[in-house]
Amino acid sequence: MYWYKSKTRFAVALAAVIFTIACLSACKPAIKETGAQLKYFDIKGYFEKDSARLSKLNPLVFKTVVHNGVSESKKVHIANWGAELNFFKSSDINRPAWRDSYTIEADSNILIYRAKDIDLKTREIVIKLDKGKVKWILIGNYTKNLLYTTREKLSYFPDSLYMVEKMQAVRVIGINNYKITGAFTQ
């Protein structure tokens, strides 16, 4: 029974550490709350506004989900655009701690942000603009730790298509590949 108590103590300690980290990260104010000016393109704000716009429009979407090669497609009206586009919103790089963590390349119609630190989840954001209006957004995310490795490629073309490609390799479980595509039909 000694081994059982050791595993239980370890599990409780691990849960306490994870809970503490989650609580501490939740206490950090958003950049907008601090009053600081945004240094990078406002990904979070853009997708919040576009989610609200799409909720009002309620477009018909041909949605395809592929999980490890098994595909399912159907035409749907998305009930919660905020949740649907959350992968994109969570790639926001406008945090006070990351103020100087990305290089910026820009010309008249392309913005490119690249992470200077390989430990940052969002590695690259490429935004195509036309007269200040977003034409498309591409985002590359990568996370690696002791338990898993995750790669995400996010593509968004307003009023046309969005795509989330995700590969996750979990140590005990194995590899999972996901691809979610939503094509606007109206």
Image: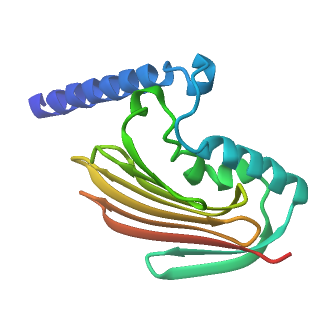
Q: Could you tell whether 140 is left or right of 6 in the image?
A: right
Which of the two residues, 6 or 67, is positioned nearer the viewer here? Answer: 67
The quarter of the image holding the C terminus is bottom right
Say which residue appears at 13% left-offset and 31% top-offset: 1
Which percent across, then down, holds residue 162? 64, 67
Looking at the image, residue 74 lies above or below residue 17: below
Q: In the image shown, does 132 or 18 lie closer to the viewer?
A: 132
Q: Is residue 158 left or right of residue 39?
A: right
* Figure quadrant of residue 19: top left
The spot of residue 129 in percent (x, y) is 65, 61
Q: Nearer the viewer, residue 165 or 140?
A: 140
In the depicted structure, whether residue 95 falls above or below residue 85 = above
Total labels: the figure holds 0
Residue 167 image point, x, y percent:
39, 66
Residue drawn at the location 29% of the way across and 25% of the way down: 12
Residue drawn at x 26%, y 24% as measured from the top left = 13
Q: Residue at x 87, y 61 (%)?
A: 58
Q: Is residue 185 above or below residue 90?
A: below
